[in-house]
Every structure is written in structure tokens, then in C-alpha cells.
């Protein structure tokens, strides 16, 4: 199963929804941009720290993905 990013913008209220469709992060349902957006949502006092953690995680995943792409080339 290798579908694109499942993100649906909040402005979409009627079926059929259009998903983002970008290449998702390995093991996630969303591309890096939307993964970050979803995880950064609803943060308050610890928002900054949490955002940093998510950023670090995304960087890790991106690096891993790049390595995979090089190995599969
Ligand atoms: Zn996306």
C-alpha cells in the first residue's frame, strides 16, 4: 500500500475530498509538511518544545528516506 499523503484541508467540507497526494513519510500517512502541521496543531505551553521534537523526528525520517532512495537507485 503506497498511497499519497492522506491530508485533507479543513476547508474541504464536501465529498469527494481531495487528499494532498504527496509522497508520505515512510511509515506515516502524511507528507512531511502535513505531518508537521497535524502534530503542531493544538499546542500551547509546550508547543515550541513539541514542535522541535517533531522537526527532529521529520529530519530523521527524511534522512532515512534519502538513504533508502540511494540504496534503491
Ligand atoms: Zn501532504
Image (cartoon, grey):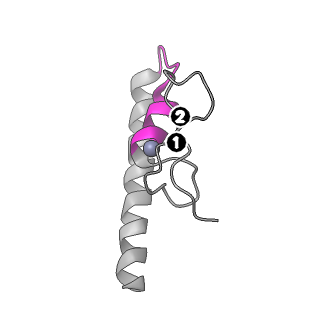
Disc 2 beta carbon < 8 A from ligand 1? no
Q: CA distance from mark 1 to mark 2?
A: 5 Å
Residue at the (45%, 49%) spot, across then down: 31
The answer to whether residue 21 is above or below residue 47 is: below
The answer to whether residue 42 is above or below residue 28 is: above
Give the quarter the ligand 1 occupies: top left
Residue under label 2, please give it.
8
Numbered label attached to residue 19: 1
Callout 2 crowding tier (Cα within 10 Å): few <14, some 14–19, many ≥20:
some
Viewport quadrant of the C terminus: bottom left
Which quadrant would residue 15 be assigned to in this image? Answer: top right
Q: Which residue is most to the top? A: 45
Region of the chain picked out in magenta, as a range: 33-46
The answer to whether residue 6 is above or below residue 2 is: above
Magenta residue check for 42: yes
Disc 1 beta carbon < 8 A from ligand 1? yes
Magenta residue check for 38: yes
Asked whether 70 or 63 is in front, the reply is: 70
Amino acid at each position: 500500500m503506497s498511497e499519497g499523503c492522506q491530508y485533507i484541508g479543513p476547508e474541504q467540507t464536501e465529498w469527494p475530498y481531495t487528499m494532498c497526494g504527496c509522497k508520505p513519510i515512510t511509515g506515516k500517512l502524511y507528507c512531511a509538511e502535513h505531518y508537521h502541521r497535524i502534530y503542531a496543531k493544538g499546542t500551547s505551553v509546550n508547543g515550541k518544545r513539541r514542535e522541535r521534537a517533531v522537526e527532529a523526528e521529520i529530519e530523521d525520517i527524511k534522512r532515512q528516506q534519502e538513504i533508502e532512495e540511494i540504496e534503491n537507485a
